Amino acid sequence: MSFEPGAQVGDDEIPLAVPEIRGNEWAYVEKCLTSGWVSSVGAYVNRFEEMVAARAGAPHGVATVNGTAALHVALLLAGVEAGDEVVVPSLTFIAPANAVRYAGAWPVFVDVEPEHWQMDAAKLAVFLRERCERRGGALWNRETGRRVRAIVPVHVLGHPVDLDPVLALAKEYGLAVIEDATESLGATYRGRPVGALGDAGCFSFNGNKLITTGGGGMIVTAREAWAQRARFLTTQAKDDAVEYIHSEVGFNYRLTNVQAAIGVAQMEQLDAYIARKREIARTYVEAFADADGIEPMREAAWAESVWWLFTVRIDEARFGMDSRALLRALQAENIQTRPLWQPLHLSAAHSGAWAEPCPVAERLNLECLSLPCSVGLTDAQQARVIDAVLRAAGLARAR
Ligand SMILES: *Cc1c(COP(=O)(O)O)cnc(C)c1O
């Protein structure tokens, strides 16, 4: 008896973002299986690490089982210890905050800015200046009594954070910067790729990301010692490979060669994928230019976004319905959309964490909706989405 995985998406359903497999994936996986090197050591792992690191402008890449594991290990590299605090934006997928907790530390949530929806460096500065004090060569949150150790700027939705002011604050206060670039592989900030602008950066190759290995992640860094330690920690912290001696508790966090084989094929297509993402974004932006109350995410002058999830902001009064009513209207036409994440300062999972006021994150959560934008989205499918959005607004206003 054999197992036949069937299609899960109906013919007329337009998904939000699904993987695009159309290059050398089959050929490389076959070579990998034929070679017998299927586990966490192999030529594809090395090649994949080189390719991603080069793309991020970093000398070292260490592949991991997923992006969350990459973040966990990167925080440990930065010296984050149990009881410490790490600053994270409130508006992001929950993974970076969870990774902070895996390290036994606490996230501190700061707001995002209203222009590009990324971590707000001005509000980060307010937290560091007004809530924290320096003592004994470290920075302490006066409100919680915990030591602040690192900042995790998250480049959400494919667009970079305005990073220079964040890096300047990190320097001023002696904090490490771990970039969460999981949603933004290939994006550039002032002409430089994201991921290698802080002390270390993390990527994800989950199925809904720009490129995928099914599941996977990577740490990139310019620090040779950090890269070595990342390899050590992700392979059960083995001191002696022959005698199996361990001096600390490590993790089984390495990516397999089979997955890396897919990753190498996906990396070969990254430029084409980004070009298609930008084209999809341009088409949406033009289509909604004259529509009232629907405002697409904007690209900053200093940024090149990869438009991972194309997202619009809905002004209920002018559009005629709110973002969730639009979600339901599109769902009725088999078009999948998604609101932005619940702001993490409101998440029960992280109650107990210190949070600065985050009014912008709260509003964006209520008002934003991501639209279908798979690399493989056809022009006809996109036209259907655009038509459905504009029709929904027209009907709502006519009521
Ligand atoms: C996807 C994602 C991650 C990591 O995800 P994995 O599924 O563990 O690979 C981390 N942070 C953000 C912001 C993400 O969107």
Image (spheres, rainbow, N blue to C red):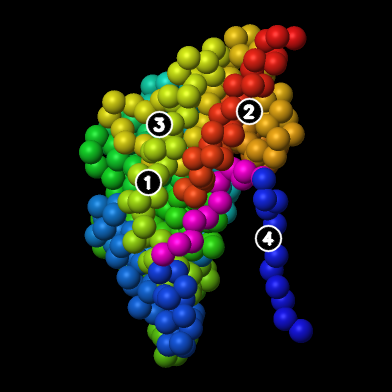
- Rendering quarter of residue 390: top right
Q: Which residue in the protein does label 2 denote?
A: 388
Which one is closest to the eye, mark 3 or mark 1? 3
For the residues labelled 3 and 1, the Cα–Cα distance comes to 12 Å
Q: Nearer the viewer, mark 1 or mark 2?
A: 2
Question: Label 4, label 1: how many angstroms apart (C-alpha)?
Answer: 26 Å
**Cα distance, mark 2 to mark 3?**
18 Å
**Viewer-side residue, 139 vs 152:** 152
Say what amino acid the circle numbered 4 marks: Ala
Residue type at mark 3 is: Arg
Q: Is mark 3 within 8 Å of ligand 1?
A: no
For mark 4, does the 10 Å Cα neighbourhood hold few (<14), some (14 to 19), or many (20 or more) residues? few
Magenta run includes residue 19: yes
Position of residue 11 measured from the top left corner of the image (x, y, whole percent): 67, 50
* Mark 3–mark 1 CB contact (< 8 Å): no
Sequence-wise, the earlier of marks 2 and 3 is: 3
Q: Earlier in the sequence, mark 4 or mark 2?
A: 4
Observer-side mark, 2 or 3, equals 2
Label 1: which residue? 274
* First in residue order: circle 3 vs circle 1: 1
Q: Main secondary structure of the magenta part?
A: loop
